[in-house]
Amino acid sequence: MKLQLALDTPDLVHELDLVGKVAPYVDLIEAGTPLLIREGIRAVREVRRRYRGRPVVADIKVIDAGEPIAELAFAAGASVVTVLGCASDEVIARVVRSANRYDGTVMADSLSILDIPKRAAELAKLGVASLCVNRRGLFNQANLSREAKVEQIAALIRQIELPVYLAGGINHEELMLLRDLPLAGVIIGAAIAEAPSPVESAKRMRDILERRI
C-alpha cells in the first residue's frame, strides 16, 4: 500500500519545506488543488525538480477541456493527473491520451459520483488507471464504530475494478485498520502536515504500512 502526501496549503515555500523533511517516508507527492490554484503548474515543476525520486500527482481535478490542461501538468513533470470521475467520457479520454504521450497515468476522483462501482468500470474502459475515493460522506456513518466504518469502506472497495486510493482525514489509528484492506494507497494531508512533528508522523505512517508497529 502506497503513501501519498497531499500538499494542500496554497504556500509553495512552506510545502516544499515540508516535503524536504518527510520525503523519505512517502511514495508519491501530490500538488493539491489549493496549491495549484495559487501557484499554477510551477508547483508541479518545483516539486519534480527537487524530488525526482518520487512520482508527482497533479490534483487538478480536470472537468473541462481535458487535453490542454493535462498537457501542462505532464510537461511540467507530473506522473499522475487527476480528473473528476463525473466529467464527460470525451474529456476523460482526452486526458488519458495526454497521459499516454508522456508515459503518465490518470487518477479519477469519486466526488459527485452516485454509483461509484458502475462509474469505475466505465472509467477503467476509458483508460483511467486509479480511483481516489474520499471516505467522508460515503455512507450514513452516524453512531457507527470505527471498525464498522472501515468494514463499509472495505465492502465498497471490493466492488471497484480500479486500484483505489483512499482519502479523507485519515489518522494513525484509522490507518492501523485500513492497512488490511485491498487499497492501492492512502492519501494523507493534515495528519502529517499539521502534526507537532511532521517527520515523526510520516515515519509512524510508514511504520504502520510496513507493519513495524
Image (cartoon, rainbow, N blue to C red):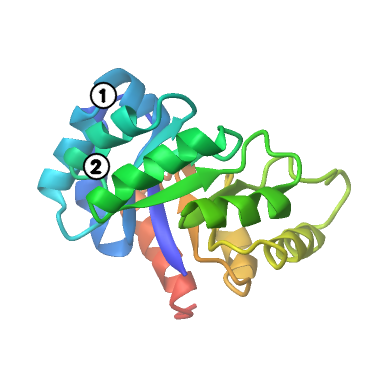
Q: Residue 184 location in percent, x, y?
A: 50, 66
Q: Residue at x 25, y 45 (%)?
A: 78
Q: Is residue 85 left or right of residue 118?
A: left
Which amino acid, mark 1?
Gly
Give residue 153's quadrant in the image: bottom right
Q: Is residue 39 left or right of residue 133?
A: left
Helix, strand or loop for disc 1: loop
Neighbourhood count class around disc 1 (C-alpha, 10 Å): few under 14, some 14–19, many 20 upward: some
Q: Is residue 179 above or below residue 29?
A: below
Q: How many marks?
A: 2
Residue 149 position (above or below residue 209):
above
Single out the residue that lies furthest toward the right.
Answer: 143
> Would residue 178 be found to the left or right of residue 15 on screen?
right
The one nearer the camera, 164 or 128, is: 128
Q: Residue at x 65, y 68 (%)?
A: 177
Residue at the spot of label 2? 74
Amino acid type, callout 2:
Phe
Q: Reply above or below: 95 against 174.
A: above
Give the residue at the far left of this rendering: 49
Q: Residue at x 64, y 56 (%)?
A: 121
Residue 33, by quadrant, is: top left
Q: Measure the alpha-carbon separation of dots 2 and 1.
A: 13 Å
Q: Where in the figure is residue 107, as x and y percent of width and height?
A: 46, 49
- Front position in the image: 166 or 159: 159
Q: Residues within 10 Å of mark 2 (few under 14, many from 20)?
A: many
Q: Could you tell me residue 212's position as x and y percent? A: 44, 80
Q: Does residue 106 appear anywhere in the picture?
A: yes
Specify the label residue 58 is tagged with: none
Q: Which residue is mark 1?
A: 40
Secondary structure of the residue carrying numbered label 2: helix
At a point 60% along the width and 72% down the height, the residue shown is 182
Residue lying furthest bottom:
212
